[in-house]
Amino acid sequence: MPSVNNLSCTLSIPFGPSTRDASLEADLQDRLDRGHRVFAVGDVHGHLATFRALLHRLQLGPEDRVVCLGDMIDRGPNSAGVVDLLRSHNQVVCIKGNHEHMACQSVNSDGAFEAWSPWMKRGGKSTYGSYIVATEGDLYEARARMRDDFIWLDSLPTQIVLDRHRLVHAGYDPGIPMHMQGEKEMLWIRKTWYKHDAPLDAQRSVFFGHTTTTKLSQFAGEVAFSEHVLRDGRPAWACLDVGAYNHVAPGIAAINIATLRTIKQPTLRCDRWFDHRADGRGRSGTWRVEDGRKEALVADSFGLRALANRTRRASIAEQNALRELEQAGLMPSQTLEPTDGGHEVNWKKGSHRLAGPTSFRIYRRRQESVRASHHTLSPFGRSVREGESV
């Protein structure tokens, strides 16, 4: 087995063999053979809005498929929402990444959920917090949902092998026969893999994530391709983790594995938990990390602070709406007891006049045989005759 120096994992964590899904591989290969598109997508890391935007840009046909290369959770603001989307979207399939591997250690052999401390220290707090926010602060329901989702994540394959392509999260160890490699190599390896000086599979291009391309200096924020090529001219590998929170050009990238055409969706403003304007006044400036933060704000107080902030923003929005309705002449006639959804309000038309013009005329069309009377309509809905004061 490779030494720890070959890997990015220094945790005391159980490793299993590699797993594949034969039916999934057959389905993807059949779609490629029939000319449909299969996209590989790099690390999403809980950036739900940006991932949705990327899926929209792909303009998927009904027979197209998307393969997420692991690390769908942790770090970002809405891992719970990402997993919910993955489990419900019939055109998106996934393989396991090292962050899923860590999260799954929180489910004990008896099925009980207990947050694994090393995972919580490496991005898991934001995932935990996002489930608490998704369940409106119900800790029991949040833990139940995490348990169910993590069991699903643990069932994902560690690699997908097709006729001309391999899809894996981290890569492979060149010093180990391919059939002997397992979770330790496929989910955690870094430099030993992508610095290897020859193609590892002479027939297949390898698509992987895990290592952000900002660490490959000439490819910062962009999809990286190996300098080594296969006999048919295709690159030996392509790295898809362009860094959803990399401070250089953050985003999530997809590649058509047949044509090698790439599409990158920059991280949306609502997902940019990791930076702020350098001058603090909203003007053009350098983006930089705030206080060395490594996770989204939802990690603070396990989501309770984010939940409180969301409630506060909703309250402010409600107050602003009430103020605008009051200015428009609609006044609350009676405020009832608060309900689960907030305050229930009955509305009536205000008694004061609006600023600006207070009357206008509406002329009805004259019929051929009957001359219609002209009327004026007040802004409060009362019809008056022409010339009458409003």
Image: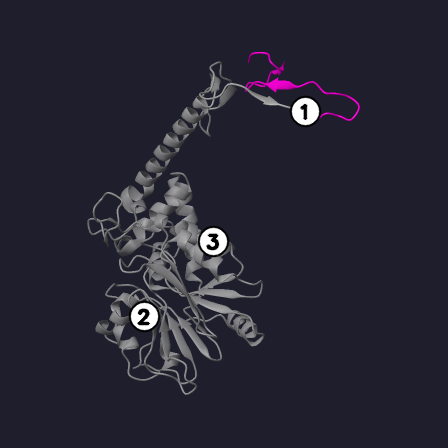
- Residue with the mark numbered 1: 364
Mark closer to the observer (2, 3):
3
At label 1, which amino acid type do we have?
A: Arg
Task: Decide: few, some or many residues near mark 2? Use Cα within 10 Å; few <14, some 14-19, many ≥20.
Answer: many
Q: Is residue 321 above or below residue 220?
A: above
Residue wearing tag 2:
184
Query: Who's the residue at 37% across and 73% down the image?
Result: 238
Whether 154 is drawn above or below 260: the answer is: above
Which residue occupies the foreground of this view, 2 or 210? 210
Task: Indicate which disc, 2 or 3, sits on the residue closer to the N terminus.
Answer: 3
Q: Can the viewer see residue 128?
A: yes
Task: Judge whether 185 appears above or below 347 on screen.
Answer: below
102 falls in the magenta region:
no
Corner quadrant of residue 6: bottom left
Q: Amino acid at mark 3?
A: Leu
Reply above or below: 84 against 176: above
Name the residue rendered at 41%, 50% in the picture: 80
| Labelled disc at residue 85 | 3
On the image, the x and y values in percent for residue 37 come to 52, 69
Q: Under tag 1, what secondary structure?
A: loop
The residue furthest right is 369
> Which is nearer the N-term, disc 1 or disc 2?
2
Give the spatial CA distance, label 1 vs label 3.
54 Å
- For the record, the magenta segment spans 365-390
Q: Position of residue 289 (x, y in %)?
A: 23, 52
Q: Secondary structure at mark 3?
A: helix
Residue 377 lies in quadrant? top right
Q: Measured from the top left, where is residue 2 in percent x and y?
A: 26, 76
